[in-house]
Image: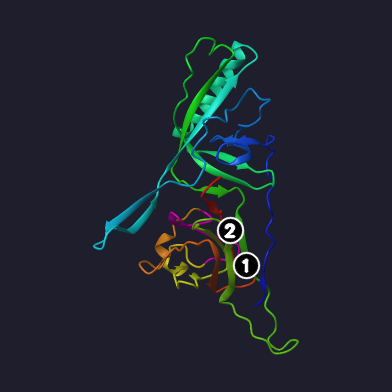
Amino acid sequence: MPIITAAVVTPEVPEVPPPVDVPEIGYASITYVDPSGERWPMTDLSAEWYTLAEGVSGLGAAPYTLTADPHPRGGSRLRHVQPQARNIVWPLLVKGADHTKFVKNWRDLARAFTRTLREGPGWLEVARPDGSARRIAVYYSDGWDGQGRTATGITWDSAVLTLWCEDPYWLDVHAQTVHRETGTGVDYLAPYPSVSSSQVLGATTVVNPGDVDVWPEWHITGPATSIEFTREDTGEAFTLDMAATSHGALLAGETVTISTDPPRARSGTGENLVAGLNWPEAILWSLPPGETAVTFQLAGAEAGSAVDLTYYPRYETA
């Protein structure tokens, strides 16, 4: 049965201010996106707020904790490496044409950062002149205090924020996607003898251009009765058996989304299907940096059955 591969569509990148020289990362345009989705330019020097380059830190490689054991012949041997949450120090100047305008800007920005503690993380986006961009999820920690010096707090003031990042890695702003779809079957004898399969939807090589493992999300479109995903280099695999769920087989147009981190399986109508995974053998595997051979296998696949793999490459630095 033919396999149709869809082209990857790159989404448009929102407008960003001209790049400026930022410590640790060089020339870049930086934008803060609050939990509501509102974008706050951080490097537009013509705006009424912008980042003070001196004092910025925490944009480099992720911090790690190393666990080692003493070695009887001297020294130690590394046993475990654990990435740690990172802190980003972010000095910010805020001003206004008059005191009323300054106070409004100060209050609006304070809310844009502190609302992360109530509504979920904001995003710090770093865009390069070549069009690439990375982002990291941030929570406000502390620092929204004025200098408290003479002349500050009237038409200008500055704050030195600490932003806490539970995941220390930067994400690409664009998702990488792989699409496989079952085409229409052909007659066995027309125009010549041929064999097609309704089981194996696709074997492909997936490329992770990032620095560390990514944990992908799978979107399956029926018809299908069970779905198996295998990472060929390790043999790790997991299967979602629709017959083992209250939903039953996926009909044409019905969907299931499987998240590997955290482990989760949901139908398009929100049903929890995680019990259909083949525990305890199931391993919801990650994709390491570089190329990885993977196989998607659907039982009961027909024309229209499809699998979409989505992941965001992760990087050590901005």
Crowd band around label 1 with a 10 angstrom C-alpha radius: few (<14), some (14–19), many (20+) = many
Residue 180 numbered mark, or none: 1
**SS for tag 1?**
strand
Front residue of this view, candidates 180 and 41: 41
Q: Disc 2 marks which residue?
A: 209
Q: Nearer the viewer, residue 33 or 157?
A: 157
| Residue ranking furthest to the top | 150
Q: Which residue type carries mark 1?
A: Arg
In the depicted structure, whether residue 83 falls above or below residue 191:
above
The image quadrant that residue 204 belongs to is bottom right
Where residue 188 appears, x then y in whole percent?
68, 86
**Residue at image location 53% in from the left, 52% down from the top:** 314
Q: Residue at x 65, y 48 (%)?
A: 132
Question: Residue 114 in the image: x percent, y percent?
Answer: 48, 29
What residue range appears in magenta? 250-269
Check the picture and name the quadrant holding the N terminus.
Answer: bottom right
Q: Quadrant of the C terminus?
A: top right
